[in-house]
Amino acid sequence: MRALTFILLLLITNISSFAQSISIGLSYNYLYSKQLDKSIQLYNFSRPFLENKQPLFINGITADVAFLFKNKKQIKHGINATYSYFGSEAKNINYSNRFNLHFINLNYLIYLANAEKFKKLYSEIHMGVSSSALYRRLNGEAFMVDDKKSKSLGIGANIGVKIGYHLSKHNIHQFSPFVFFGYKPYIYAPKNEAVINATQELITKNYMYALNVRIGFTYKINLQKRSDVKTEIK
C-alpha cells in the first residue's frame, strides 16, 4: 500500500510536464463484495446481543486524478489513479466498532471522444492494479492483536468503464458529470476475515472480488490548449 502510494505521488510530480491534460474528480461510490458481505454477516450473527448491527460496506467516496499524454488523435492514452474509502460503524452501549476499508488503484486508461458524432459525450476504459487495506477500531482505538494493529492488506487487478459529458464548451476548463462501472476480478487479501471475525477462511476465501458504481463530477484542464493560448498572447 505504501509502495503504491509512493509510485502514485512520483507519477503526479513528473507526468504533468508532458501531459496534454489533467483532471481531478470526486464521486459517490457504491460497492458490492460478496466475500466482505459474508464476513460482516457472520460478525453480526455471532453477536446477537448487539442492538445495532454492523452495516455492510456499501457507501463510499472516491477521489481521482488522471493525465492524458500529448496526442492529437481522437483516441488518447493516459494514467489514472483513484483513492476510495468505505466505512462500517456500529455504536452500542459501551461498545463502538468500526471497520475502515481503503482502495488505491493505479490504471492505464484509453480516452475516447468524437465531437462530430457524439458531441460532448466521452468515454474511458481503465485497467490496472488495485490495492486494499482493511483496519478495525474498537471504542475509538486501533484494535490490537499480539501488540500489533489488526489489518489486512490486499493486491490485485481492476478494470472499468467511465462515461462522461462535458457541460462546458470552454477549450481550457471543462466540467463533466460521469458514471463509472468498475470490477475487481481478483484481490488477494487473506486476512480480511481475520480482521472482521478473528477467523481464517471459515466462510470466505483468501481473496475477494468486487463490483462498484461511481457517480460524480470531473474538472479538467487542457494544458495543451492553455499553452497555445499563452503562445498567442506573446
Image (cartoon, rainbow, N blue to C red):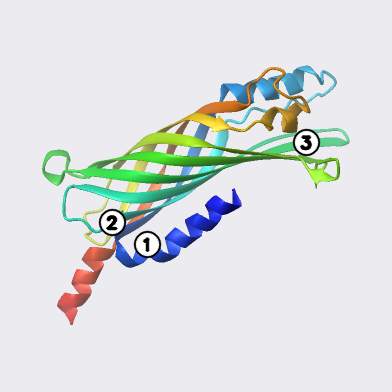
Q: Residue at 70% x, 21% y: name it.
A: 201
Please tell me the numbered disc located at residue 170. Answer: none
Task: Work out whether 104 lies above or below 212.
Answer: below
| Cα separation between marks 1 and 3 | 41 Å
Give coordinates of residue 123: x percent, y percent. 28, 40
* CB contact under 8 Å: marks 2 and 1: no
Whether label 3 touches label 2, CB < 8 Å = no
- SS at mark 1? helix
Q: Which residue is mark 3?
A: 97
Q: Indicate the position of residue 151 as horizontal and vertical percent values.
A: 71, 40
Furthest residue to the right?
94
The vertical placement of 78 against 98, above or below, is: below
* Drawn side of residue 184 relative to residue 87, left or right: left
Q: Position of residue 155 (x, y in %)?
A: 55, 38
**Observer able to see residue 23:** yes
Question: Could you tell me the amino acid type at mark 2?
Answer: Phe
Q: Which of pointers 1 and 3 indicates the residue nearer the eye?
A: 1
Q: Amino acid at mark 1?
A: Ile
Q: Is residue 48 left or right of residue 7?
A: right
Disc 1 to disc 3: CB gap under 8 Å: no
Q: How many marks?
A: 3
Q: How many residues crowd mark 2 within 10 Å: few (<14), some (14–19), many (20+)?
A: some
Visible in this render: residue 140?
no
Residue underneath mark 1: 15
- Residue located farthest toward the bottom when viewing the structure as drawn: 234
Tell me residue 2's x, y (percent): 60, 52
